[in-house]
Amino acid sequence: MSKSKFIIDKLAKLFEQGMVSYKDLSAEMLNILKSKRDEFIFKMNLTGKEETEILIKRIEKIEKKIEQLEKKKIKKVKKS
């Protein structure tokens, strides 16, 4: 119950601050969920904080490379 109350409180604060646009709301929700995910991982003691940060950076680099490859693929398909 306290976890759902935490999310509801965060959403209420967002509306109070006037962040009602869809992009702002979705970005803030993603940030909240990412922080809760990180908190959960740290509580489980799966990895250390430094190791987790390194892994997160690696994943972000891989995601950027995938996006670049997808863009190149789309450009090649349009040229054909």
Image: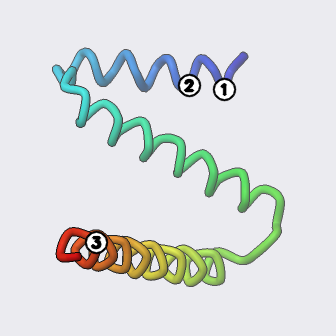
Q: Which residue is mark 3?
A: 77
Q: Residue at x 60, y 79 (%)?
A: 55
Q: Earlier in the sequence, mark 1 or mark 3?
A: 1
Q: Amino acid at mark 3?
A: Val
Secondary element at tag 1: helix
Q: Earlier in the sequence, mark 3 or mark 2?
A: 2
Which residue is identified by label 1?
3
Residue underneath mark 2: 6
Task: Classify residue 40 as left or right of residue 18.
Answer: right
Q: Residues within 10 Å of mark 2 (few under 14, many from 20)?
A: few
State whether residue 31 is above or below residue 7. Answer: below
Residue 68 versus residue 7 in the image, above or below: below
The type of residue carrying mark 1 is Lys
Residue 8 at what x, y percent from top left? 50, 17
Instruction: Say which amino acid is labelled 2.
Output: Phe
Q: Which mark is residue 69?
A: none
From the viewer's perspective, tell me whether residue 23 is left or right of residue 39.
Answer: left
Q: Position of residue 80 (x, y in %)?
A: 23, 76
Distance in Å between CA atoms under marks 3 and 2: 46 Å
Scheme of image coloration = rainbow
Q: Quadrant of the N terminus?
A: top right
Do labels 2 and 1 touch, CB within 8 Å?
A: yes
Distance CA(mark 1)–CA(mark 3): 46 Å
**Disc 1 vs disc 3: Cβ atoms closer than 8 Å?**
no
**Label 3 Cα neighbours within 10 Å, binned few <14 / some 14-19 / many ≥20:** few
Q: Position of residue 34 (x, y in %)?
A: 53, 50
- Secondary element type, mark 2: helix
Count the numbered circles shown: 3
Seen at 76% across and 75% down, the residue is 47
> Helix, strand or loop at disc 3?
helix
Q: Is residue 1 above or below residue 32?
A: above
